[in-house]
Image (cartoon, grey):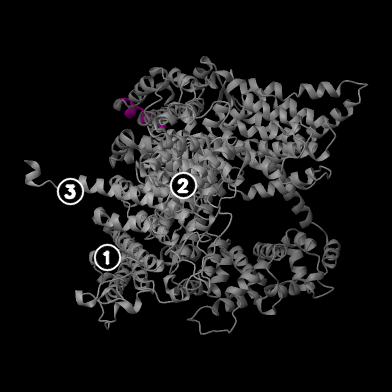
Amino acid sequence: MSNVFTSSPKSVSGTASPIPRLRGASGGDREVLLQPRTNGIRPSASYGGVAGMSVGGTTVNGPGSFSASLRSATTTVPTPSGLSGIVDTPSSTSPLTSERLVEELTDQLNRAIKYKEGAENLLQVLDSKKIKEAKQARNQAEKEYNARNQEITQLKTQIEAITKPKDIPRRPREGNKFQGTPIRPDEANGISVLGTSEWDPGSESPTITLAELLGDLEEKDKKPEYYVDKANSLVMLFKRHQNLKYELSWSTFGLRVQFMLLHEAKEVVAAGYRITRYAITDLHSLRSIRSLRTDYITIGSLIKDSRANVEREQALKFVRAFIEVPGGVKEISRGVVRGIVACAEQTDDRLRAISMETLAEILILDPSLVVAAGGVRILTQVLSDGPYELSDTISLAFLYLLDMPSSRKYIRPGNDIEVVFSVFTDCHSVKVPVPEEKLKSSAKVISCMLKSWPGLLALTMYNLRAPRSLVDALFIPSPSVRDTILELFFDIFKIKPPSWSSSFLAGRRLTTYGRVANLKSEASTKPARSEGDSDHGNLVDHFTALLLAVFFEAGLLKALMALVEDNSDPAIVRKTTLLLGEVLKLASRLLPSTYSAHQQLLPDLFQSAAKFGIDGRFAASSAVYQIDSLNRTLHRSLATQTAQRTSLDEEKRGQRQVELKLKINMTIDEKHFSQLIVESGVLNTKSYIKWNWDSLNEMIQGPLLNPKRLEEAIKGTKFMKRLMSFYRPFKYKFSDVKNTKPNQRYVRIGCALFQTLLKTAEGVKYLSENKILRQIAECLAQLDRMSGITSPEPLFSTSRLADTLSSGYFAMLGTLSSDPKGLQMMERWRMFNMFYHISDLPDRPDLMELFVLNMDFTLEGHPRIILGKVLTAGPKTARLFATNHLRSLISTTSAGKTPSQTQQSNETAEWAIGLLMTQLYDPDVEVCETAVKILEEACNATHNLEYVVKRRPQLDHLGEIGAPLLLRFLSTSVGYHYLNELDYINREMDDWFHGRNDSYVLTVEASLARAFADEEPVKKRPGDINAIDRDMMGIVPPHFYRELARTSEGCILLREKGHFDQFAWFIQKHGLEDDDLEIVTKVKGCLWAVGNIGSMPFGAPFLDEANIVEAIVNIAEQSQVLTLKGTAFFVLGLISKTMQGLEILLEHGWDGTTSTMGDSLGFCVPLQLGRLFSLRPWVHTGDETNAVNRPSPLSSVIGDDPLDAKILTAIANLNNHIMEGTSTKELNRLKANHVSHFQSSDLYRRVMTLLESYRYRQHVRRYIIDLFDKSVVEQIVRDGRAEQDSIESPQTPEDVR
């Protein structure tokens, strides 16, 4: 989804470029054009079906190119067998091979230089530390520095060897005239000759090559493939030398372009468009191109039939190249846009989809041009009639125009965007069922609109007419319509049904036996929300609260209750019941009690259920029961996911029950214990499959904890011997079990067995003497090159670790590492020595990842040292994995822990934080970013934050990557004083005040857009500070002024600087600005600054002093810029996070949402929705039928010649399908009798004016153009050339006199 929360859709990507790129509007371009058809020649690759041409595996994109993913057909064009070299194949030797290799080596060189700089930075940091403390890190940094120096030297040598010119035997140029390679100068010019794959691109003289190519194109009467070959070589030259096009002489180059564009062969014309497209540089070049009369030629190309698709496609790419030049859309004539509109109207046209997207892009950049050309009508039809894959993309263009009043006037209020609702509202009047694809497409467009401020505010005009019509469509007795609308509500409210919903919707009985426990176990595996997360406002939830209020006002609950009472379709009833329960749960959480309290009662449903004697009572009663059962289940599942509603007493009660059960099991008598051993099946058979593993688990965690019972199991029976034998590696029982999820229970029971044995002296003795540890050590020794033990198939090989439970031994070793006695056993068998050696294996990072994942690091010892070694000296994948694992070692909660456990947890967390601080100086940027993110999360806990500040980290070398962590330091007084000593606060404050506020607007709106689009974020590149994490989508990003307002010292500085007062003044003065986009962006930045300051308890008094809340409320209720209204709405939600702000908002007619404990949740809505939805219908600027948009009526082009008048009148009448037949006959008669008139260039110009001013279908446009000889266009081009020569010809002294 494009960013419809801002006035510029481009800001989704985090940049401020004003030119949007719609989906499918970019992609690859062919490396070369295919040759013309030749009879009896074998076919080559399809031209139309290729989205991008790859040169040695690298996709080359050209200006104005687009993706072919939406093309409905492909065209296969045969290529002469003698010209097969024109299309390079990956297997053939290409002249670009060496160039590509140089690029790859250069990339490696740049990376090596960055690594070297990172090592230098680390050495500089270590210089400030004591030598003993930093000795190991210094050695590693020096080692890395020396290695990178050596790598840089080798890469430079390789690059120099490749780029050095080679002596190549001379070959005649004619020998490869048709081999498809770019033409280069002869050796006689001092440069090596082409025609061989050993040619070096660095030895090429681009200007000489360009002159030769232009000279070759000047030759007449050559075959079409000759010109295509030269054009391909010219394009390749432009690609290799990007600056060459800036040195073109258009007086010469334009002649070659005109010659190719006027050629009879469509492939040559296409090649002409292509070289012209690659020669575009700026507005001046566009004007030079248009002076060649390319508008007439382009219009003629676009009207051709499917046989000339290669030419039509290049012509459309040529037009699209204008869009990519800043301001270039102004150089696109209305006649050309008319031609694109005609392509878009043709349902069977292969270029229809891209024509529509091109119109949508032009609509964003220059809406008046598309309106004047009649393009809005066809784009509006796409929303409801398809193509369905384009409808949601086209809707983004309309949403963009709706934002500002200056662009909103081009859209008809209540018509252009509401047309998509007609698919649902007209279903009852259509006899044929609406296709499901059309319903889903329309629902997707509606969802896209309702998830944006322009769409929501425009659709709520006319007293919520559009939302009411959607709700009323639920009463249409059509299962497909109802099901689609219900799914739409699940989508727009962002409701994710619980895991058991599929069973409920399938009609199975709703039970929760065993399910709530499962949900709790699943929730326990998810990372708990940190205590600082509540400070960040959730903008998605705030917007969802407003959507709920809108649809409650539109009668959604009444419609859902009516569907629940309707038993015509049980599947729809069940889905409606689930939606009703979810909506009520959502309303109770997000909406103020003034909205949700009455709705929770479901008065209509209870009233129907209470009417005795009516048949419908039973359906209503059943619905009440289902909703009640569903809500209870939802409440239980919600309780497992919401930390605020989890009872600590209940958890402690569960722990006491487990402990009580263990005590009972430990005190069982000898007879009962013997019976348990027999029931386990261990003594009956050696086959572990027949053992009762549930009984074994209870025994291990119960009776075997009793030393007496353990001794009986060891000495009195073969129970322990057989059990331990199963786990011994070289018995190949446990170690050969397939690695599946059910089989993981063997690993869990094995770990429990080790833990039980470690708790008693008898168990420790038995474990230390058992062969299992010696065999595990031998398995590790198989991987240790210094041990002398080898094996053709080690037990810990990569394949066995992945396919079998051999990896479970690492989990058992992790259990040992949690106990001092276990660590002694591992030291006895020299396991840590082997782990030290294994950590040096560059080809087995998986072993270190298993070590890091399973070891317990709470105790001082070798595991911590090895982890530190992996973090600093391991390969990148291992370092990154280990860095991420440190997150689990930093505990942010002490709930349910004893004081000793809390102390141990804090000590481990501090140790992990120390390692993370070391990772900040890692040479790889991605590792540094990960460390910063984990530290930022850890700093949500106050004691962790104070410890990090105490370590006084140096983050200057990280630049913007370390900025979030530094912002987090501001939230405490200790951090404030530390940053103040570094002079960070004053510098950062000035930076935010003078520009960062504006970029913050783009960041938060991009986050919102991606959160509502439900799309996976683009994979973040190392060092990309604009990328947005999935967890932070829809959350208010960190803001400098919010962190500053957390402390009293920060508020004092804020008051001294006077920034808040300046923000408030700017908002009050320019809050209702609706014309200047730059001022609107600044107002948004000031609003976010004020809102972030006001969301903090120390910052709330600033709101009262500046009396700014009233101005923000006025913006939310009266602004004509729709995204600015939305920004004000979100800012009011931030202000409502404090009780003082909540009181101020209540005075202005806005109510906030509070928890059961009275704490504000940061969501607020107006008491009267009409105050927010105050957008009124606007005056629409007419389309092409308006006199303003038709500057060339028929009377202005007829002229004095009566015959010309008849021709022009007949052509004008062709746009009327009723008069089309008569006018066609009249034109055929006139052409037969007066051929000379159809050879007049003046008449042709006037006909083109009519084509620009009136709407003609594609076949009519083709008929009109075909009436004239092609020589007419050539004459017009020659006339233009003469005019251009007269303008550019220099004046002689005689002329001056």
Residue type for callout 2: Ile
Mark seen at residue 215: 1
Q: Which residue is found at the position 43% from the left and 19% from the top?
A: 1111
Residue type for callout 3: Ser
Mark 2, secondary structure of its residue: helix
- Residue range (magenta): 1046-1055
User: Residue 892: in sight, yes or no?
Assistant: no
Mark seen at residue 1265: 2
Magenta stretch, overall SS: helix
Q: From the image, which quarter does the C terminus lie in?
A: top left
User: Does the magenta run of residues contain 1054?
Assistant: yes
Among numbered discs 2 and 3, the one appearing first in the sequence: 2
Gap in Å between the C-alphas at discs 3 and 1? 22 Å
- Residue nearest the observer in this picture, 143 or 70: 70
User: Residue 769: in sight, yes or no?
Assistant: yes
Q: Position of residue 1123 (x, y in %)?
A: 47, 30
Mark 1, secondary structure of its residue: helix
Mark seen at residue 1289: 3
- Residue nearest the observer in this picture, 1003 or 30: 30
- Residue nearest the observer in this picture, 946 or 1077: 1077
Mark seen at residue 280: none
- Residue nearest the observer in this picture, 219 or 1091: 219
